[in-house]
Image (tube, rainbow, N blue to C red):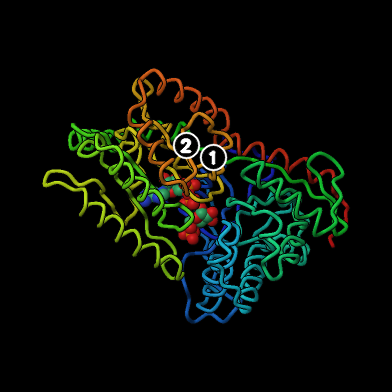
Amino acid sequence: MGHRDLGQPRLVVVSNRIADPRKTAAGGLAVALADVLNSTGGLWFGWSGKIDDEAPQGEGKVHVTQAGSVKLATVDLCRADHDSYYLGYANGVLWPVFHYRLDLADFDAGYIAGYRRVNQLFAKKLMPLLRPDDIIWVHDYHLIPLAAELRALGCTQRIGFFLHIPLPPPLILAAIPGHDWLIRALFAYDLVGFQSQADLSHFAGYVTAEAHAQQVEEHRWRAFGRTLEANAFPIGLDVEEFTTLTHAPEGRDMYERMRSEYSRRKLLVGVDRLDYSKGLPQRMRAFRHLLDKYPEARNSATLVQIASPSREDVEAYNDILKEMESLCGSINGNFGELDWMPVRYLHRTVARARLPGLYRASRVGLVTPLRDGMNLVAKEFVVAQNPEDPGVLVLSRFAGAAEQMREALLVNPYDTEGTAAAIQLALSMPLEERRERHEHLMKTIRRQDVHWWCQSFLAALEKAQAEVKGTPWL
Ligand code: ADP
Ligand code: G6P
């Protein structure tokens, strides 16, 4: 996809987390949006990542910079807004509930006010930067009410929303105090996109049961005096960019180093943010079971697990840190030999340029979240493989990616024995079968890459607005 032509609407992307598109980031959203904006140009608006202790609540300085063809506009947050909006409501309520973890949610009544305040702040700071024919694309659970706040300030531009994380079934959603307000706010968008058909069906179930919405066409629902288009747009990878990285010097160097270090052993790899949704302790237990039950794996398989620090000020994330350290320590203590450690656990972010080399040197990719919107690591692992001698992807059936990637070895991460058996199968899979599975997976990943995702969403958004024009907002 080339830059949007003169005369075409400018793309304005809004997300909480933004990254310089010329640099690298951990987190599916920033990685995918950097890829999109690098090829389309436009404006990217979001949180600066800075906390300004001087700023009053609901206020923050805006910084505008140019990063290649992309203009970045970022806003600072004061401590109270950051804590209630980002740590509190977004990552203490919406993230756990949307990942089916009601037990980890903290429904503190003060959080929602901060969430609303920051969405109002974003709307207020974005409005003066907008042009009449902009097309606005808002991302993720931090910003669900942003369109409603923009509309309240008179914004008439097309606004689309994409949810990068799963949408849970109606009864789980309904456990959030104020869930009706949240979903009503979605109807200020012209188009809402989800990662998977499962998420879309949860949306349809919720709006029908709780908001008495009428389905007026295949992907259109009417409620609160407005018609909304909703559909699934599974996010993809910039396959070309990742392939180039695979063959670039840093990627190749990483590959060579891993191969020479582990020349006698098969590598298994996991790359995740250290997040309780990623099923990391369950993965470790499955690996321990593998070593226990299949002695041939001992001394011959090594698991490299990279877990980047994430949201460390949210309590639930500290528990997982301790659990992982203790599990990795006990596996190494019980199964390790003087010349072999079963697990290499790194609590850090690895430079993006080195990831493909690590994936390519690995016989098995372990992507076993308990719940995940999509999971881009699954796609990256497949793309980085050598098609002549590819590794095998072991993928949780609860990742959004499992709807597309049927030729991976699909597992239930809660089932320790079943997952261990799948890992053993992956380690011993004959070349012919590995090649066949890899070829099928590559076809899907290529067909629905990041450009397909972006183009199909924006095409649906352009069409959606024409059909709802003139409909009064709430
Ligand atoms: P999430 O968005 O929940 O973090 P995804 O798998 O969709 O999960 O996306 C994660 C992105 O961040 C991928 O592009 C992956 O390569 C990158 N990433 C995740 N963990 C690390 C890490 N430890 N080091 C470097 N990059 C990472
Ligand atoms: C997931 C979310 C993103 C988020 C990313 C990293 O991908 O869907 O919205 O940016 O995780 O998390 P962080 O809290 O560091 O932005």
Secondary structure state at the residue bearing disc 2: helix
Q: Disc 1 designates what residue?
A: 401
* Whether residue 188 can be seen here: yes
C-alpha separation, residue under disc 2 versus residue under disc 1: 8 Å
| Of the pair 326 and 218, the residue shown nearer to us | 326
Q: Looking at the picture, how far across and down is residue 139, in whole percent? A: 61, 54
Q: Looking at the picture, how far across and down is residue 293, in whole percent? A: 31, 40
On the image, which quarter does residue 186 sit in? bottom right
Residue at 37% across, 60% down = 309
Residue at 46% across, 46% down = 415
**Is residue 93 placed above or below 357 in the rendered structure?**
below
Left or right placement of residue 357 versus residue 243 in this view: left
Q: Earlier in the sequence, mark 2 or mark 1?
A: 2
Image quadrant containing the C terminus: bottom right
Q: Residues within 10 Å of mark 2 (few under 14, many from 20)?
A: many
* Whether residue 68 can be seen here: no
Three-letter code for the amino acid on which mark 2 is drawn: Lys
| In contact (CB < 8 Å): disc 2 and disc 1 | yes
